[in-house]
Image (tube, grey):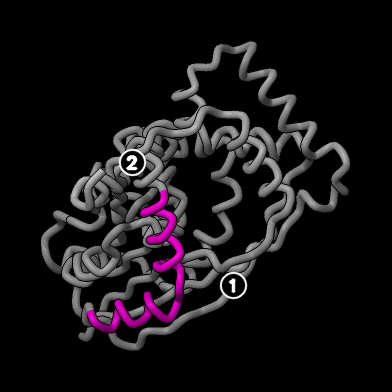
Amino acid sequence: MDGMTAIVGPRQMKALVREDYDAVGPLWEPWMGRYFRFPAERLVADLRPRPGHRCLDIACGSGVVARAFAAVVGPERVTACDISPRQAASAREILTASGLGAVRVHEMDAERLAYPAASFDRIGCGFAINHFPRPAAALRGAFRALAPGGRAGFSVWLPSPWPARIRVEERLAELLPAPGEEERRCNAALDRAFTRNSRPDRLAALMERAGFVRVAVRRHAFMVDFADASTLVDTVLAREERALARAELDARARAALRQELMAVLVDLDPRRYRVRRPYVTILGAKPA
């Protein structure tokens, strides 16, 4: 393989992210949506939207930030977007079922926001910008889409040990077929981008370069409480749906895999299913 062949570009990385979240699709909300509700509400509280404000949820997933915005400004004032068609469709369904069908949801690349300039007064992005190959492009687009005086906030995880989940994920990687070379290289590039883009100081500097002022980093934490080993294993499996689909496991094989993962946790203190997750929100404003 020559050097040119080995290069993994943003287009390949985003294609893999899209495939990943397309696979997760409607599984996201039942298994993970409730864990993201508190940080979504905290993000919106930090942004301080007011009735009448136009709000955007970037990389919306199942729409938890959009729902938090809608609780303040009303669904007709909220827009959401996601690069994954299935995630966008799932968000529409969840919002409609919640009585928030007036929220507009678009399939859109966060690094190429197509909204007109000054379209929004508040923009929120929960735990997604660290997945972007080019976060600076997303920040420039968000700055352009903000009205003068508008505010934007981006949440990212801080490193924290989570032994129970690490055990399950390591065992799952051993049990599933290894990805092909191209996917492996793409995953490695995404991992490097995730680590680089999770640094609050880097994101704060990128926001300032994009034109944001009064950039501030706020530290938060919340408790993720899995009821038992079964809930933890099922959550991990839901997040790894693309890898499971690639393995072409039938129902019996999936059930056996689940039991293998449960066995990994058999000697673990149940208190280990509860973990404090620290994270930061980087906030900035567009000059009035």
Asked whether residue 15 is in view, the answer is yes
- The quadrant the C terminus occupies is bottom left
**Tag in front: 1 or 2:** 2
> Seen from this angle, which residue lies furthest front?
2
Query: What residue does disc 2 label?
Result: 16
Q: Position of residue 61 (x, y in %)?
A: 41, 45
Which numbered tag is attached to residue 173? Answer: none
Q: In the image, what residue occupies the spot 57% across and 35% down?
A: 30
| Amino acid beneath label 1 | His
Total numbered labels placed on residues in the image: 2
Res 206 quadrant in image: bottom left
Which region shows up in magenta?
A: 188-209
Residue at position x 63%, y 68% in the image: 221
Using residue 116 as the reference point, say whether residue 257 is left or right of it: right
Image spot of residue 171 (x, y percent)? 67, 37
Question: With respect to residue 198, does 94 lie above or below?
Answer: above
- Residue 275 x/y as whole percent: 72, 58
Point 53% across, 66% down: residue: 42
Q: Nearer the viewer, residue 42 or 96?
A: 42
Q: Looking at the image, which is closer to me, 257 or 94?
A: 257
Residue that carries the numbered disc 1 in the rendered image: 220
Q: Can you tell which quarter of the image residue 88 is in?
A: top left
Q: Vertical placement of 73 versus 200: above or below?
A: above
Q: Residues within 10 Å of mark 1 (few under 14, many from 20)?
A: some
Instruction: State the residue in front, 119 or 31.
Output: 31
